Amino acid sequence: MGEKSLELPEPFKIKMIEKITLHPKEKRKELIEKAGSNVFMLKAEDVFIDLLTDSGTSAMSDHQWAGMIETTQSYAGSRSYYSLKKAMKEIFGFKYLIPVHQGRAAENILFSTMIFPGCYVPNNMHFDTTEANIMRNKGIPVNLVIEDAYDSTKILPFKGNMDTEKLEHFIQDKTPEKIPLIMITITNNSVGGQPVSMRNVKEVSKIAKKHGLPFFIDACRFAENCYFIKQREEGYRNKTIKEISRELFSYADGCTFSGKKEALTNIGGMLCTNNEELYEKLRNLTIVIEGFVTYGGLACRELEAMARGLYEAIDENYQAYRHRQMEYLAKLLRSGGVPIVEPPGGHAIFIDAKKFLPHISPEQFPAQALTVQLYIESGVRVVEIGSSCFGKVDEKTGEFIPARMELMRLAIPRRTYTDNHLKYVAECLIRLYEKRKQIRGLRRVYAPKLLGHFTARFEPIN
Ligand SMILES: Cc1ncc(COP(=O)(O)O)c(C=O)c1O
């Protein structure tokens, strides 16, 4: 009889630890009230388990730390710039690299160069910073994700895909002259960290080429996406993540990348392209706003950490562990009846707050109310991805237009928390689910126009 293969544990061991403290519940209540019911306004030291974001929160490896010490610091042409270029070329395959201090800097440089007032930028789904950087340049962000992505119960292998029929119609309707570029975000963060298939990327690329439009990938979580392709798409099981990644990027003209996710670093990003003429323009703007093009607003040690982290992100044992940890948390939550977005995403578990709190209307921010309660109950910090993040106010009528989904995201920092931490999070959420009827909505009393959720203030509705 063949033995069932064993699931491997973490492919690393712990070398250094950081103490975390859980304040008493009364203190947590006081702190969140003072913070205007906005978890971004809490001090990190007042948080027990921090699942606010997977961005810049990875635990770096000894190899990364060693590289940071070994490298030398230079304004131009540093050794670590060339390490990063080599890693980018091997894993992404683009001709030109511009390092930047984080993903939104890449977005700012790209959009400030390509966008003109009144133009449209289609994407499967823009993240909030992408959306804001387009709007700041007077462009119009458009989300063309498949309709099924909005159904949190639907199980599909590639729920992050762009609807290519919608894209074709959109281009014909608006005309290619009004569209400076097409983007696709992998994985699709805003609808649950859902992956995009190779086939979909290929189709979008074909449509872009047919209309003579540049095609860029928001590559923040490229390796998690490639691992999903390996697991779920026919023809990729025997390929390495690097081979899959090279094929995926070969369909694009460039990418924006936040190294704070899958370069396993605390800061950093990249803007890449194959287009020489565009590169010249991007390079000049980078020098004005980020720094010289071989450091892009970063210390050389941070370039080195990114270069090394990129190779660690495409390690299959690491990706298997990462995806297994996500499945573990999902399984615990399901067992307690907590409504999660299915299937689990690559970097986070998303809770469907419309299902968790059906008695709270979108105008009273159910996912934000849940986020606040979870902090009070457990000291766990997560983030709202709903109407506080993506809701709009009609400038003419003042009418509030809620987001299509009210999600609460439990982003899992890479290599940082153990299964026991996640078990505690699940137990607290299940307990909260059992007394969900007692949770009340919130009134928003302040929010700036762009990226309002970072600094918004709320009051509890009694
Ligand atoms: C899909 C996506 N794009 C872009 C960004 C922006 O990256 P950064 O935070 O490094 O500016 C993020 C950050 O969370 C993201 O998730």
Image (tube, rainbow, N blue to C red):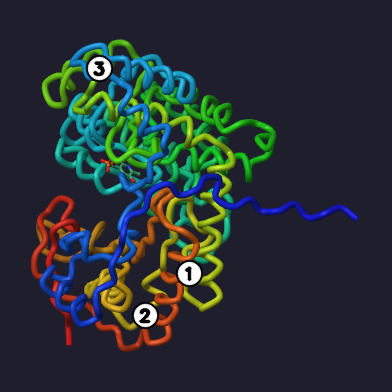
Residue mark closest to the camera, 2 vs 1: 1
Pick whichever, 21 or 43, lies toward us.
21
Give x and y (percent) for residue 461. Answer: 17, 83
Residue at figure coordinates x 41%, y 24% from the top left: 211
Residue at figure coordinates x 18%, y 29% from the top left: 112
Give x and y (percent) for residue 29. Answer: 19, 78
Label 3 within 8 A of ligand 1 by Cβ: no
Q: Tag count in the figure?
A: 3
Q: CA distance from mark 2 to mark 3?
A: 51 Å
Element type at mark 2: loop
Pick whichever, 167 or 319, lies toward us.
319
Residue mark closest to the camera, 2 vs 3: 3
Quadrant occupied by the C terminus: bottom left
For marks 1 and 3, the one nearer the N-term is 3
Q: CA distance from mark 2 to mark 1?
A: 25 Å
Element type at mark 3: loop
Q: Which amino acid does the dot numbered 3 rest on?
A: Thr
Q: Which residue is mark 2?
A: 358
Q: Give the label on residue 145, or none.
A: none
Element type at mark 1: helix
Residue mark closest to the camera, 1 vs 3: 1
Q: Which amino acid does the dot numbered 1 rest on?
A: Lys
Q: Which residue is mark 3?
A: 294
Q: Which residue is mark 1?
A: 423
